[in-house]
Image (cartoon, helix red, strand yellow):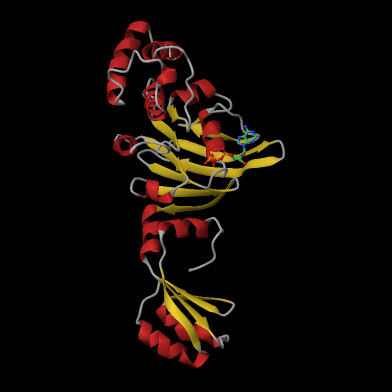
Amino acid sequence: MTIKVINISKKYGKITALQDVSFEVRDGEIVGYVGLNGAGKTTTIEIISGVRSPDQGDVEIDGHSIVKEKRVASKNLGWVPELPIFEQDAKALDYFIYLAGFYGISTEDARKKAQELFSMVGLEGREKDKLKNYSQGMKKRFALAVSMLSDPKNFLFDEVLNGLDPQGIAFFRDLAIRFKKEGKGVLFSSHILTEIENIADRVIFIHKGRIMKEMRIDEIRNYAGSSTVRVVLQKPNETVIKVVEKYGIPRMEGNTLYISDFKGDMQNLFSDLAPYGVNEIGKVSNNLEEIFFKIIGLYNQGT
Ligand SMILES: Nc1ncnc2c1ncn2[C@@H]1O[C@H](COP(=O)(O)OP(=O)(O)OP(=O)(O)O)[C@@H](O)[C@H]1O
């Protein structure tokens, strides 16, 4: 177990940003943290990283409390913020060496580390540029290099793909996969489910500060791959459900019948439903965005 979020809550004045949020990110696992803008992702990540305090609850990083043992706990944590802001007039390399000082790394060792890490994040040749002149993508790469100073076992990527070019997106995705292979844990937040579908092992859905659901990626894929049939009936009654049970998992909403995980023949279904007057019949796709909306309760169509 690596990152353990235990019942954290956070309010900003009257706004409840987080309410009783708990989850884990284990070794060698990429966990997607998905929610709409304002759902509470950044607040969660800032609390895990120790830059923000929870009103209640705690986070353990490899068994160390971020609230009570911040120094030890945060040593094993690398954090790439959503919008790294480096307005310093300082040159990237100088600032990197300065920050390395906080980790007890000497200037000489920091220079060596810089060579390795600037090249690793694709910033070689740009060491002498001023940070304020870096592009957003470069700032993210720089934040990543800084986050790797203590060679942490756990990473927090907050909307890291946002605003990146395709090369930058591929870079951060590949990196997350590499970390996973090295047995590290990665929490990867995003407001777009498809963005993390190909890399995450599990997805945690957050909405209005609460965890709505946790799903393994294969469960999400199965869900997306299964089809749902939607039938609008003229004269439905309570016997309909029994009649269509053999086709999948039925559910009535007013005059509309939904059969999720549909297996069978549409013609046969049509005949079986004929006595109830079929107005409309058809398959509904379950794309990832629909699944997302369904899970967070903003969408009632389909299953
Ligand atoms: N410093 C703050 N002061 C007051 N309210 C805040 C502050 N930071 C966040 N909030 C509010 O807390 C809620 C959660 O915000 P948060 O930034 O954690 O969401 P998010 O999921 O990261 O959103 P986004 O995808 O837009 O970054 C929102 O309602 C937001 O307006």
Above or below: residue 287 compared with residue 161: below
Could you say which is closer to the camera, residue 36 or residue 225?
A: 36
| Quarter where residue 78 is shown | top left
Farthest residue in the right direction? 14
Q: Residue 266, image x and y in percent?
A: 37, 82
Q: Is residue 236 left or right of residue 89?
A: right
Residue 292 vertical placement versus 234 (above, below): above
- Front one among 21 and 95: 95
Where does ligand 1 appear, by image quarter? Answer: top right
How many numbered marks, from 0 up? 0
Residue furthest toward the bottom? 275
The N terminus - image quarter: top left
- The percent position of residue 255, horizontal first and vertical second, equals 57, 80
Displayed quadrant of residue 25: top left
Please tell me in which quadrant of the rendered image residue 95 appears: top left
118 displayed left or right of 35: left
Q: Position of residue 108 (x, y in %)?
A: 33, 6
Q: Is residue 300 above or below residue 151?
A: below
Q: Residue at x 39, y 46 (%)?
A: 195
Query: Image point 28% across, 25% down: which residue?
Result: 120
Instruction: Residue at 51% x, 20% y: name it.
Output: 71
Between 133 and 284, the one lying in front of the other is 133
**Vertically, is 74 above or below 96?**
below
